[in-house]
Amino acid sequence: MSAKDPTFLGLVTSVSGPTVKVSLAESLASGIALIEGHMYRVAQVGGFVRIPQGYQDLFGIVSEVGASGDPNTGNGGRWMTVELAGEALGQSFERGLSQLPSINDSVHIVSEGDLKRIYGREGLDQIQIGTLSSSESIAVKLSLDALVTRHSAILGSTGSGKSTTVASLLRSIVRPNQEGGAPASRILLLDLHGEYTHALADFSRVYSATPQPGERPLFVPYWALQAKDLLGFVAGGLNENQEIAFSDKIQELKASALGTNRFPGMDPQSLTVDSPVPFSLKQCWYELMDFEVRTFTGPQRDQPALEDAGDPMSLTSSKYTPAALGSAGPFLNSQAKGIRRQLNMMRSRLLDHRFDFILHPGPWEPRLDGSVELDLDKLLDDWVGHEKPVTILDLSGVPSSVLTTLVGSILRIVYEALYWSREKTEGGIHRPLLVVMEEAHRYLSGAKEDGSAAEIVKRIAKEGRKYGIGAMVVSQRPAEVDETILSQCGTILALRLSNPEDRARVKGALPDNLGGLVDLLPVLRTGEAIVVGEAARLPVRCRVTLPAPEQRPKSSDPRVSEAWATKRVAEGYDRVLASWRAQRTFAVAQDLDIVRIQVEDTVAPHEGKS
């Protein structure tokens, strides 16, 4: 190739696997090239290059630029390192390499025509997420199939445009009211700050632990949780014998409920303490507490000294005659399990209205005999079976003490249901599901206290692909996300990251030859991302398309200068206190009884006359 070619950059000087060193031509002293009326910045980190190989073209991304300082090498010894990523034959681009370049092969600028060969692919599988940072006329597209089935991660410091990127990406997937959109999408979004309710209102259904007008109440039946997670939440720390006492009682109550109620698909012989069979937690508390406080009289010390039977519905314990010293009795129950402290904690949890969404789950709350008004099929239909493409579970009102258990329980319910129904039309294979996990570092750190959520997400990350369940992990602290989960994310959208620990974790999740791109993360603009992985045709620096202002999440920074420059209008801190106490942002201090009367327009007698 002639060095007079305006696209010519230089020559290959060394090849080490997919890593290629290039000596730059002297004609590039200015760092700018003009080709067919378009101006290109050349030899820029993150830019693309093309290496012709006969009928094929190899494409790579610049990871490093430097100069040797030896004047005898020509052009001041300027060089660059290129990481090869794919090849094209004609108009067909494919990731991976069938061959490597040779020494002195020519290296060229990637023009807009070349970029269109790479990113111009059309089809249902391709979703447009933004434009190239270096050429805003070229759309960046991702493979929807790879994005969902191979999992993904959106990582960026607070203020980098992470939430807006998530909203834009979901809007690009669903493409509401557009021809060729995906109205049958099935996306479950765990929203920890209530940011997305407004942004995705036109194609989502919202469930909240503290519902506002237009939202539905969120219920997660406690009896669908694993026994270990449930007991850890309601009873606190248990030793082995204490855990056995609780587990045996739960198993007994589930077996009793199974004997008096019909639950399709449930074989009594296969019943376990973790089977999703309803049982009354109040009845469980009552019977265990009754056994702990029971006293006996009689010659054989076998006659209960009962004074008041109590009431499980009101969580009133049975009352027995107090035990006395000596041989006269009454006598303590020598078989008691020593779990009275844990039972007191259970009662406290059941009386705490902050946990009603899980311990008193509306129509899913079992009666004392274990019967329920609605079963889990209705819950699943509400979450992932309705006509809207996106379901938002607003967890902003959930106490932090139960957040990890709640997230783990929600994901386990969904995963187990879709896993076991994989051969049915509503299973994950025939109708895949994407689970978007916002603020993932809060419950996926891999620490012991985050075990319930991290365990099921690891299972989704490792096995979900085969059953049509994809994960999208969103976090501002990738260093705190479990390494196993992050390593299973096949596509990474990395926005601005300043913390060196976070950048190191992202670098560890990238292929070895692309680690140099991490050095760009601190200087990315807001809403700009480096996209790498299975869904991207080439590693790319991309400007994510911003949704319309009214469709952006409520995550923007307060306008301090405007707020402080405006004369203060005192509102009264009684309203502040009301919201704090009610744990609802729209709570009011005083309920105003306003009678609204509909006004009907009437035509005056003189109207209509000329």
Image (cartoon, rainbow, N blue to C red):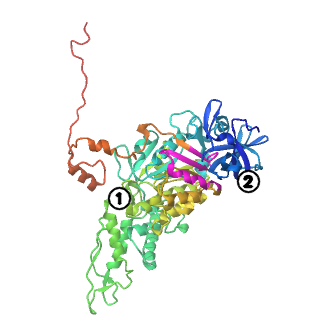
Amino acid at pointer 2 = Val
Q: Which mark is residue 515?
A: none
Position of residue 320 measured from the top left corner of the image (x, y, whole percent): 27, 79
User: The C terminus appears in which quarter of the rendering?
Assistant: top left
How far apart are the alpha carbons under marks 1 and 2? 63 Å
Q: Is residue 188 left or right of residue 112?
A: left
Q: Please state which of residues 42 and 77 is positioned toward the viewer in this rendering.
A: 77
Q: Please state which of residues 512 and 473 is positioned toward the viewer in this rendering.
A: 512
Find disc 1 in the rendering and name its residue. Answer: 356
* Above or below, 298 relative to 573: below
Q: Residue at x 70, y 53 (%)?
A: 18
Does residue 580 appear anywhere in the picture?
yes
Mark 1 or 2, which is nearer the eye?
Answer: 2
Q: Residue furthest right?
A: 54
Position of residue 548 measured from the top left corner of the image (x, y, whole percent): 45, 36
Of the numbered discs 1 and 2, the one sitting upstream in the chain is 2
Q: Residue at x 36, y 66 (%)?
A: 282
Q: Secondary structure at mark 2?
A: strand
Position of residue 128 measured from the top left corner of the image (x, y, whole percent): 57, 39
Amino acid at pointer 1 = Asp
Q: Please state which of residues 93 and 143 is positioned toward the viewer in this rendering.
A: 93
Find disc 2 in the rendering and name its residue. Answer: 15
* Residue 36 found in image quarter: top right
Within the magenta stretch, is there residue 519?
yes
For mark 2, does the 10 Å Cα neighbourhood hold few (<14), some (14 to 19), or many (20 or more) residues? some
Residues rendered magenta in the picture: 513-541
